[in-house]
Image (tube, rainbow, N blue to C red):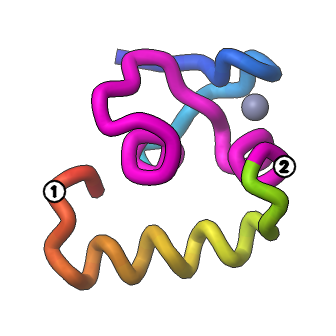
Amino acid sequence: MVHRCINCGRTVTGLDAGLTKKLINRGAEKYFCIKCLSEKLSVTEENLRERAAFFKKNGCTLF
Ligand SMILES: [Zn+2]
């Protein structure tokens, strides 16, 4: 199933959806793309990718 960013309409990847759940709302059913997430949280996309990799490495089930 393809999700679209609720802010810009860009296609949301599994990683973006995982980050939205992890950082915004665990029960989220609407997602942000990584670009909008980074703007919303005032961090870089690179920072979010690193955090996603960290969560994944630690066995987070959202990724
Ligand atoms: Zn977006």
Secondary structure at badge 2 equals helix
Residue under label 2, please give it: 39
Direction from residue 39 to residue 4 in the image, left or right: left
Q: Earlier in the sequence, mark 2 or mark 1?
A: 2
Q: Quadrant of the N terminus?
A: top left
Residue type marked 1 = Thr
- Res 55 quadrant in image: bottom left
The magenta region covers: 16-40
Is 36 magenta? The answer is yes
Q: Quadrant of ligand 1?
A: top right
**Residue 32, position in %: x, y?**
62, 32
Q: How many marks?
A: 2
Numbered label attached to residue 61 = 1
Q: Residue at x 68, y 76 (%)?
A: 47
Q: Which mark is residue 14?
A: none
Residue type at numbered disc 2: Glu
CB under 8 Å between discs 2 and 1: no
Q: Tell me if mark 2 has few (under 14), some (14-19) or many (20+) residues whose alpha carbon lies within 10 angstroms of its own.
A: few
Q: Position of residue 19 (x, y in %)?
A: 47, 51
**Secondary structure that dominates the magenta span:** helix
CA gap between label 2 and label 1 equals 25 Å
Residue displayed at 39% across by 41% down: 21
Query: Is 62 located above or below residue 60 in the figure?
Result: above
Residue positioned 84% across, 49% down in the render: 39
The quadrant of the image that shows the C terminus is: bottom left
Tell me if 37 is positioned left or right of 55 in this view: right
Q: Does residue 5 appear left or right of residue 38 in this picture?
A: left
- Residue 57, placed above or below residue 46: below
Q: Residues within 10 Å of mark 1 (few under 14, many from 20)?
A: few
Which of the 4 image quadrants contains residue 45?
Answer: bottom right
In terms of secondary structure, where does tag 1 sit? loop
